Amino acid sequence: MDASKERPRGGDGQFVRSLSTAERDARAAELRSKGWTYRRIAAELGWKQGADAYNAVQRVLKETVREAGEEVRSLELERLDRLEAAANEVLEREHVTVSNGRVVVLHEAPLPDGGPVLAAIDRLLKIQERRARLLGLDAPTKQNISITPERAAALEQLVEELGEQ
């Protein structure tokens, strides 16, 4: 039986993996990990060709990598949450200027120190940038690339030379 025929199509034309298909894919990956050839796996699981077994193993590998990536992403987001909480504590805390081990006083009140607040803001921005990269929230930067007619001609000549080889 052809592996592609056993999975129904979803509403968007994509194949939807059933539980039995997922189990067979997992079995194919297991057999491949034991050194079986794709042709042998296909015969064992009732597929017509080794390509069906290959595709099944690739689906499992792709899914495994995606799940591992999601787990790592989740851990990284938790770490960023902890760092953000610590930076927010620094941001909210009152800071006074200290010089030579003594609090600097101006008009009989401790002189506020904005340095730690600004440093916390910088750190929070870095955390936000990292989170945005991790989640893919930032749109790609568009770039205009222009080429002079002289460089275009040189490029065409190079392409022709490479084609002659």
Image: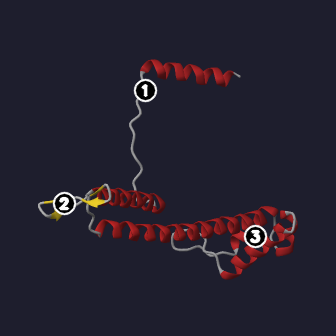
Q: In which quadrant of the rendered view does residue 126 lie?
A: bottom left
Q: Say whether disc 2 or disc 3 marks the residue closer to the N-terminus.
A: 3
Q: Amino acid at mark 3?
A: Asp
Where residue 39 appears, as percent x and y from the top left, is: 86, 64
Q: Say whether disc 1 or disc 3 marks the residue closer to the N-terminus.
A: 3
Quadrant of the image containing the C terminus: top right
Residue at figure coordinates x 64%, y 20% from the top left:
161
Number of numbered markers: 3
User: Is there a contact, CB below 8 Å, between mark 2 and mark 3?
Assistant: no
- The residue indicated by pointer 2 is 105
Compare residues 134 and 24 and report the one nearer the observer.
134
Q: Is residue 91 left or right of residue 105?
A: right
Circle number at residue 2: 3
As helix, strand or loop, the secondary structure at mark 3 comes to: loop
Quadrant of the image containing the N terminus: bottom right
What distance separates the C-alpha of mark 2 from that of mark 1?
62 Å
- The residue indicated by pointer 1 is 147
What distance separates the C-alpha of mark 1 from that of mark 3?
50 Å
Residue at figure coordinates x 65%, y 79% from the top left:
18
Q: Say whether disc 2 or disc 1 marks the residue closer to the N-terminus.
A: 2
